Amino acid sequence: MAKVYNQEVYVQFLKQHGFVFQSSEIYNGLNNSWDFGPLGAVLKQQIKQALYNFFIKNKADVLLVETPIILSELVWKASGHLANFVDTLVDCKSCKYRFRVDQINAEIKAKKDWNSFKVNCPNCHNQNWSEVRDFNLLFQTEIGVVNNDKRLVFLRPETAQGSFINFKNILQAKKRNLPFAIAQFGKSFRNEITPGNFLFRTREFEQFEIEWFCKPDDANSLFEKQLIMVEQFLQTVLKINPELLKKHEYDQSELAHYAKKTTDFLFNFPHGLKELWGLANRGDFDLKQHQEFSKKSMSFFDSELNQHFLPFIIEPAVGIERLFYALIVSSYRREIINEEEREVLSLPFDLCPEQIIVLPLVNKLKKEAFSVFETLAKTRWRVCFETTGSIGKRYRKADAIGIKYAVTFDFESLEDNAVTIRDRDTLVQQRIAIKELPQWFMKNGQ
């Protein structure tokens, strides 16, 4: 069974090696806000590139868009977020902890249900509760410079609505038949009352959402097809350990207000089996709502059927930070080699922030080794160079940050014009001629 460590192990590991830092740390930190460091920022970018390559690139029926963070208040009124995007919360008066009521008891769905249950505080075990309240999760702000002319707006809680309101614009510009998809990367914001669990739930996060528009009769088959695509991406591109994944289909009583069907890919995070990637059949809810509130037609004309109708929407949606966290948990391990512990981040080669490291055996060989680095730096791979510390310590550090191959220039290299390549995962070493390095990595870079 795959080993999952406690959360603090990942927090400290990622900080130590420059992946993720506490935001505003020099000012005692901002609760549940995280900065991506030099390695983390590159890894996050590689995850996004992998998503683009797999789901969008060279796909004639998938179109990429970018829409603003700030949208009209009417968008959120039409979508139902102003009325329905709430958490039902309660405070423990004894220990001052705040909880979502469904975290205390999954059977409690709304304020009216609270009094039917006698529950103890999970933290202090008392029954000294405040009144139950609903909190809207939208971040409010204002636009306008004059006080009496300011207008209330909201930071988007999802990218999807920006895609929906542009459905007709894109249809007219690109002349697509059904099914086709609008995909979008972008920042979203949710005023989470109880954020936590590291990168799993934050107030500011990045999403990747695809909105597939299809005929109502095709929705079920398209849903199943996208389910397969998501699973393929997780297992063949990110190479997530399948032991850590589980599919969960929601009961009708558990569905969001817009959904006809939802299936989640759950991942075994340090805090438990939780949602990683959701797939929803949103029906025609969104287009119908925007048609009603905007008074603009959102229908699609099918020339074969000679009729107008509102397409159904199939939506795969994932948070980039959650994918990042899941990838770290799946890839990280500790093991004993020759009575010494080493940390290993077994990332797929294409995702490694630094893929190849060039190492002179000793500093005397720095100049010659750097020439090898310069040769490899002209290729498409991400290459780095390191001279600090013994060769053993440099190997260990390279393993920990996920570098797949270490290229060592030693004294023999001066004679045979070859270097030693060491594999991060197998620890196998082999001798390769310097002039053959680009071809070797082209063949073995995987």
Image (tube, grey):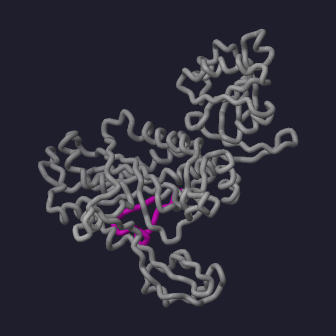
> Where does the C terminus fall, quadrant-wise?
top right
Compared to 295, does 167 lie above or below? above
Residue sitting at the far front: 146
| Residue that appears at 42% across and 79% down | 134
| Residue that appears at 53% across and 25% down | 380
Total marks shown come to 0
Magenta region: which residues? 247-263
Residue 280, magenta (yes or no): no
On the image, the x and y values in percent for residue 170 come to 23, 45
Q: Nearer the viewer, residue 328 or 18?
A: 18
Compared to 99, does 382 lie above or below? above
Q: Is residue 340 left or right of residue 385?
A: right
Q: Nearer the viewer, residue 172 or 245?
A: 172
Q: Quadrant of residue 368?
A: top right
On the image, the x and y values in percent for residue 211 come to 34, 51
| Residue that appears at 19% across and 65% down | 293
On the image, the x and y values in percent for residue 61 come to 31, 40
Compared to 194, does 427 lie above or below? above
On the image, the x and y values in percent for residue 34 come to 55, 55
Residue 261, magenta (yes or no): yes
Residue 136 visible in this rendered orientation of the protein: yes
| Residue that appears at 62% across and 40% down | 347
Q: Quadrant of residue 200?
A: bottom right
Q: Is residue 365 left or right of residue 83?
A: right
